Amino acid sequence: MIDIARMAAVVAVLGTGVVYGTDVFCALVQRPAVAAIDDHALVAVMGNVHRYGDRRMPLPGAIGIVAAAASAVLAAGAGRWAGAISAATAVALLLIWLVLYTRISAPINRQLSVAAKAGDTPPNARLLQAKWDRIINARATIQGLAVAALCLTLII
């Protein structure tokens, strides 16, 4: 059973790693790049990025959460409490990330996506992006901690 728990942890690392890498890229590259363009370009680029990202990123995120939960349950069932705790910690972190995303990032994503699709530049475009930018470091950190917890699950 512990081997299956570890396989689930590997799948969780892979799914979570997609989201983690995306958030790190956004924090390190996208945020300063977008700060250097005009508002119309900001809405066109970020609105379309969010339009595609919000459709495609839930799958690896869900795979990461489900596989992390499976790893926690399976490790507990095998009596591997340290692995179960580290995988459960990853699940908790991923759920915290999900709350941040759904409550803060997703509504902004929708506004920018609608504006981009319509070819509009809302007067608050820069403010919307600033609100989104304010939590990207926290999102990347939470995802990184979840990946670290899952990796710990693999080695203990």
Image: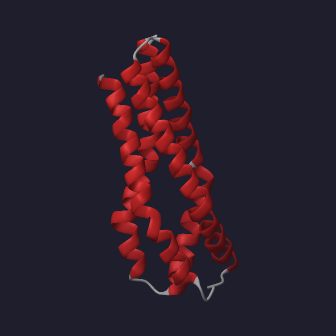
- Residue 27, given in percent of the width and then of the height, sits at 38, 64
Residue drawn at x 46%, y 49% is: 19
Residue drawn at x 53%, y 82% is: 127
Residue drawn at x 61%, y 57% is: 102
- Residue 144, given in percent of the width and then of the height, sits at 36, 47
Camera-side residue of 76 and 6: 76
Residue drawn at x 50%, y 37% is: 91
**Is 110 located above or below residue 75 in the figure?**
below
Quadrant in which the C terminus appears:
top left
**Is 111 located above or below residue 141 in the figure?**
below
The answer to which quarter of the image holds residue 146 is: top left
Give the number of callouts: 0
Residue at the far left in the pictured view: 155
Camera-side residue of 60 and 147: 147
- Residue 43, given in percent of the width and then of the height, sits at 56, 78
Q: Is residue 21 left or right of residue 71?
A: left
The answer to which quarter of the image holds residue 134 is: bottom left
